[in-house]
């Protein structure tokens, strides 16, 4: 399985720290799967203008094609103005309709206050559902106080990230098996 | 309807169209040369004519995986190679061309073909042509409306005086040559949603509506909205033909049709849209109520008659060559259409 870990912001460190942890967990515990980190801070993305994603050049083409080739995506997002950052929304806008069909998508969210704990439910999951993702129901919500100097210092968060990585891989495997079985039935 | 060369006493018209896509055959990984692809299109038009098919269309796209960018030139070759079949674009991306040049080209095709040419004008669902030909995408809506109005004006008038935003003004301009019978049928290409169907209705011009798949009933609102809009601007919908289009693959059995079409449909979608065609959705397609034309000949006939009841269209256009379908499969499709499908649907739709 090809897994993409996406850090959806171009500023700050918390989301990057959290998503890097997920990458580390997958590399250590599921070495049979390939995982790539896409940190949007490292790429210069164009705004979506209606072209097909593969018709862009440079970073925009690389990032979108990498996402489209993935079987599973772990999205890390900060909370900006009670929602996802524009940089992450732009990724969705660059992709075609139904872009996440047959892909598993799980989410990690960071925020400055616990009051944003439903942001994923209200803002991100409806987009993922519209794009036909197999959404991993539970997500990991991480607050400012769970970090210290770019390290996660709350064991509960670390355990939850491990379970998120496991759920992502497990659900990915399950859907691959279901699909193979169904495809065999289709006979075309 | 006569103005648009539609004779309903002969039943519904059946046409073939191609986008001129140039995609490797997914079964072999091989892609024929652009030259072979174009020559096979010309040959397909001759086979279509022999099979009694009414219309043959060629469209333009300016991206990778296409080969009929100069679709009017290809239509010119087809005009010379055939003698009865109607010739149309499917579609002409009017927004990126000068309507005067478009009209000159099609009037010329009309003369070469002895009065068989039509124009289907659209905005293009792929945006590559805009950048390539120097058209600003921010004018996407307005530029098309303006150019279509001009095209219609050229068609309706001997001398054209016109002024607009996107082209130099015309003062008593005579656009030549004139088509054989003075004017050409000009259709508006319409995607799924009603908004652009309504615009076609307001303008009182024939509509070619894409119904590429999913429940056929989903496209009914566009048909209704078109006729309502036409009526509101003082046209009689009974005078305005509607054509529908879909991807098409027929074989002796449902299973053969599904197996024959899927790799091409999926590969074509992957190449052009960047995501394949979902198998789950494809498995539903042979159902009479689904707009995607795949199945046995009996199923295709059922589908066409069901849609005829639903939309009351005057023409159906089938895209049978999408996604690198090899020529022998194309010939087989044309043969079944001519032998079995045409006689059945004509019989039931004669007025």
Image (tube, coloured by chain):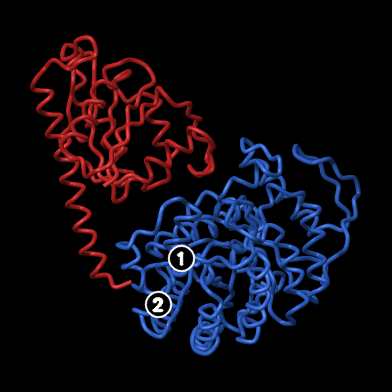
Chain colours: A red, B blue
Give the quadrant of residue B110. Answer: bottom right
Quarter of the picture containing the C terminus of chain A is bottom left
User: How many neighbours does mark 1 have within 10 angstroms: few (below 14), some (14-19), or many (20 or more)?
Assistant: some
In front here: A157 or B227?
A157
Q: Provide the secondary structure element on which disc 2 rests.
A: helix
* Above or below for B17 versus A95: below
Give the quadrant of residue B138. Answer: top right
Where is residue B119 drawn, in percent x and y?
Answer: 70, 62
Is B108 left, or right, of B68 in this rendering? right
Give the quadrant of residue A80. Answer: top left
Mark 2 or mark 1, which has the lower sequence index? Answer: 1
In front here: B144 or B36?
B36
Q: CA distance from mark 2 to mark 1?
A: 16 Å
Q: Residue at x 73, y 49 (%)?
A: B97
Residue where numbered disc 1 is placed: B26
Which residue lies most toward the top here? A149
Where is residue A90 drawn, in percent x and y?
Answer: 42, 31
Q: Chain of mark 1?
A: B
Residue where numbered disc 2 is placed: B257
Mark 2–mark 1 contact, CB under 8 Å?
no
* Above or below for B154 versus B283: above
Q: Provide the secondary structure element on which disc 1 rests.
A: loop
In front here: A183 or B238?
A183
Q: Chain of mark 2?
A: B
Is A78 left, or right, of B316 in this rendering? left
Q: Residue at x 52, y 64 (%)?
A: B24
User: How many neighbours does mark 2 have within 10 angstroms: few (below 14), some (14-19), or many (20 or more)?
Assistant: many
Is B346 left, or right, of A147 in this rendering? right
Mark 2 or 1, closer to the camera: 1
């Amino acid at each position: 399985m090809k897994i993409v870990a996406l850090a959806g912001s171009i500023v700050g460190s918390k989301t990057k720290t959290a998503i890097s942890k997920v990458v580390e967990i997958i590399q250590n515990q599921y070495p049979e799967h390939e995982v790539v980190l896409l940190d949007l801070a490292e790429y210069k993305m164009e705004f979506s203008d209606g072209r097909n994603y593969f018709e862009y050049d440079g970073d925009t083409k690389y990032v979108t094609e990498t996402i489209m080739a993935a079987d599973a995506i772990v999205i890390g997002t900060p909370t900006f103005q009670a929602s996802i950052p524009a940089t992450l929304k732009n990724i969705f806008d660059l992709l075609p309709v139904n872009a996440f069909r047959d892909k598993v998508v799980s989410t990690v969210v960071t925020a400055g206050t616990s009051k944003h704990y439903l942001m994923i439910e209200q803002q991100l999951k409806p987009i993922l559902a519209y794009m036909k993702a197999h959404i991993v129901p539970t997500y990991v919500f991480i607050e400012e106080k769970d970090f210290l100097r770019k390290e996660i210092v709350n064991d509960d968060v670390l355990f939850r990230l491990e379970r998120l990585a496991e759920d992502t891989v497990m659900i990915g495997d399950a859907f691959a098996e279901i699909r193979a079985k169904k495809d065999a039935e289709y006979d075309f | 309807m006569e103005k648009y060369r539609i004779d309903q006493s002969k039943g519904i018209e059946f046409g073939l169209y191609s986008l001129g896509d140039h995609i490797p055959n997914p079964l072999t990984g091989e892609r024929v040369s652009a030259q072979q692809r174009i020559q096979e299109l010309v040959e397909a038009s001759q086979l279509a004519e022999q099979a009694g098919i009414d219309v043959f269309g060629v469209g333009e796209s300016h991206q990778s995986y296409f080969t009929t960018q100069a679709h009017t030139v290809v239509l010119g070759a087809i005009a010379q190679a055939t003698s009865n079949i109607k010739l149309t674009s499917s579609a002409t991306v009017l927004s990126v061309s000068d309507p005067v040049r478009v009209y000159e080209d099609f009037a010329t095709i009309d003369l070469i073909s002895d009065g068989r040419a039509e124009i289907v004008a659209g905005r293009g669902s792929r945006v590559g042509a805009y950048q390539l030909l120097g058209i600003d995408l921010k004018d996407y809506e307005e530029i098309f409306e303006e150019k279509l109005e001009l095209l219609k004006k050229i068609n309706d008038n001997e001398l054209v005086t016109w002024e607009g935003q996107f082209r130099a003004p015309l003062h008593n301009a005579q656009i030549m040559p004139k088509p054989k019978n003075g004017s050409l049928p000009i259709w508006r290409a319409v995607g799924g949603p009603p908004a652009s169907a309504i615009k076609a209705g307001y303008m009182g011009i024939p509509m070619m509506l894409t119904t590429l798949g999913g429940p056929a009933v989903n496209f009914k609102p566009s048909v209704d909205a078109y006729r309502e809009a036409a009526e509101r601007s003082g046209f009689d919908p009974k005078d305005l033909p509607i054509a529908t289009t879909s991807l098409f693959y027929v074989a002796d059995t449902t299973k053969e049709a599904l197996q024959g079409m899927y790799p091409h449909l999926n590969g074509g979608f992957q190449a052009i849209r960047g995501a394949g065609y979902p198998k789950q959705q494809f498995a539903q397609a042979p159902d009479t109520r689904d707009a995607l034309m795949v199945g046995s000949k009996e199923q295709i006939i059922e589908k066409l008659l069901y849609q005829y009841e639903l939309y009351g269209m005057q023409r159906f256009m089938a895209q049978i060559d999408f996604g690198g379908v090899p020529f022998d499969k194309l010939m087989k499709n044309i043969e079944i259409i001519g032998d079995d499908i045409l006689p059945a649907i004509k019989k039931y739709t004669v007025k």
